Image (cartoon, rainbow, N blue to C red):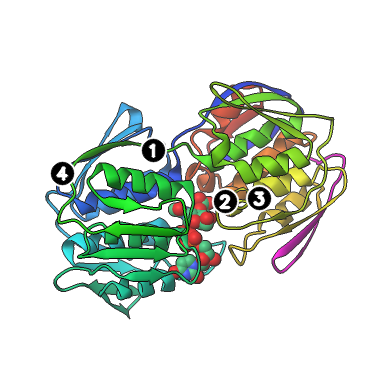
Amino acid sequence: MDSIVVTGGKALHGQIAIAGAKNAALALMPATLLSEDPLTLTNAPRLSDIKTMTALLQSLGVEVTSMQNGKVQVLSSHAMTSTTADYEIVRKMRASNLVLGPLLARHHQAVVSLPGGCAIGARPMDIHVTALEAMGAQIDLRDGYLHAKAPGGLKGAKVPLRFASVGATENVLMAATLAKGTTVIENAAREPEIVDLAHCLRRMGAQIEGEGTSTIIVQGVDRLGAATHPVVTDRIELGTYMLAPVFCGGEVECLGGRMDLVAAFAEKLDAAGVDVTETDKGLKVKLRGDRPRAVDVVTEPFPGFPTDLQAQMMAMLCLADGTSVLEEKIFENRFMHAPELVRMGARIDVHGGHATVHGVETLKGAPVMATDLRASVSLILAGLAAEGETVVNRVYHLDRGYEHVEDKLGAVGAQIERVSGT
Ligand code: EPZ
């Protein structure tokens, strides 16, 4: 397993290009199942999670052609061979469950393994199942798999979500495009990745309105056609690199960054004493003083503060002048980065869904372990500030969601390298 070694204290200067969004691409790729005509995705991120989704779709018979070093993906499901998403693939990546809606919509059947829990929580699928059953699907849980069928196809329905689940909204949105009649999704998730998926489905011929609001209305159509769609900028990678200069000084311009993707996050950065400036190329970021100020953070569904930036923000608050309280309201176990940061000298008390961070002047480099995707990058960020060397192990977590983090940070002055493991 590879490790990443960071030596702290080097100020950062320059530009970092932000890639297409992992969490948009993972919903856009299964959309190919809705049509026999090809779907071309541009600005696709080069990540191991995309490779996993590719493998899953190929196991169903989808043709996936990768071009321009993975930045363009051409998908075609004109020759499907299976409607079963196998546990061996699904267990590696929860987003595999996003084939459920499209398979039911066009093939009227699907067998999808339950993803099982992961480091950050139990990650059930009850909201997905209840919503698809409201559209006429019959779904049974047997031997760890959801056995779903919709004889005669899905029907449009009013679908209230008990929680604004991103994945459930995506599954229902895709399913509704081919359902008979009108579907109204209430309490829909509003994340930019949902908006991006709706834009792509509309390009394929879907009739959708209200994406980005809590109520999405879909008129089912008989078939969807070919489309070419650019994947939206990754707001989580963007927020991650916006934070980098706060740890070690300097100024970084995040190319492709858009303020509307990170408004709640940027607001918190401003309160912490960080300047975020819109340029014609993206977002330029630097720390106003010589130390960030403490701020409190509560994670919420979009447009609130994103849970996927909570770990990175906690790492920054470890160095802030004052005490901050972070409340994680989306996942039940998303503070696993805290004990690793404490190993670097941070002062953090975790009680249930709350973490209290008492800012310290410096962190010390140490060997630390990545536990999940966003926790691992928060340790890299802490390493940028720490005195001495930080070795982050198990960076396969990192590679799921960040393209060549050592190249992007190294190019703006960080002393960082990847060490191949055994
Ligand atoms: C998406 O996961 C993202 N993944 C996650 O990003 C992100 O953290 C999450 O949305 C919240 O923003 C992708 O888009 C591939 P949810 P998803 O359904 O769809 C509970 C990353 O680091 N829930 O909005 O799985 C669930 O347990 C990843 O890139 C149910 O109880 O998130 C969780 O506590 C991590 N029943 C909460 O809702 C359900 O049926 C939010 O889940 C579904 C969800």
Mark 1 C-beta closer than 8 Å to ligand 1: no
Q: Is residue 215 above or below residue 387?
A: below
The local secondary structure at tag 1 comes to: loop
Residue 136 magenta = no
Q: Which residue is mark 3?
A: 311
Magenta span of residues: 348-364
Crowd around label 1: few <14 · some 14–19 · many ≥20 (10 Å): many
Per the model, the C-alpha gap separating discs 1 and 2 is 19 Å
- Residue 37: which disc? 4
Q: Position of residue 62 (x, y in %)?
A: 20, 49
Q: Which residue is mark 2?
A: 303
Determine whether label 1 and label 2 are within 8 Å by CB. no
Crowd around label 3: few <14 · some 14–19 · many ≥20 (10 Å): many
Per the model, the C-alpha gap separating discs 2 and 3 is 18 Å
Residue 159 visible in the displayed image: yes
179 or 403: nearer the eye? 179
Of badges 2 and 4, the one in the foreground is 2
Q: Is residue 397 above or below residue 300?
A: above
The local secondary structure at tag 4 comes to: loop
Per the model, the C-alpha gap separating discs 3 and 4 is 40 Å
Query: Which residue is found at the position 62% from the left and 22% from the top?
Result: 412
Of badges 3 and 4, the one in the foreground is 4
Q: Is residue 46 above or below residue 286?
A: below
Choose top left, top right, bottom left or bottom right for residue 83.
Answer: bottom left
Determine whether label 1 and label 3 are within 8 Å by CB. no
Determine whether label 4 and label 1 are within 8 Å by CB. no
Q: Amino acid at mark 4?
A: Asp
Of mark 1 and mark 2, the one earlier in the sequence is 1
Query: Which residue is found at the position 35% from the left and 52% from the top?
Result: 209
Of mark 2 and mark 3, the one earlier in the sequence is 2
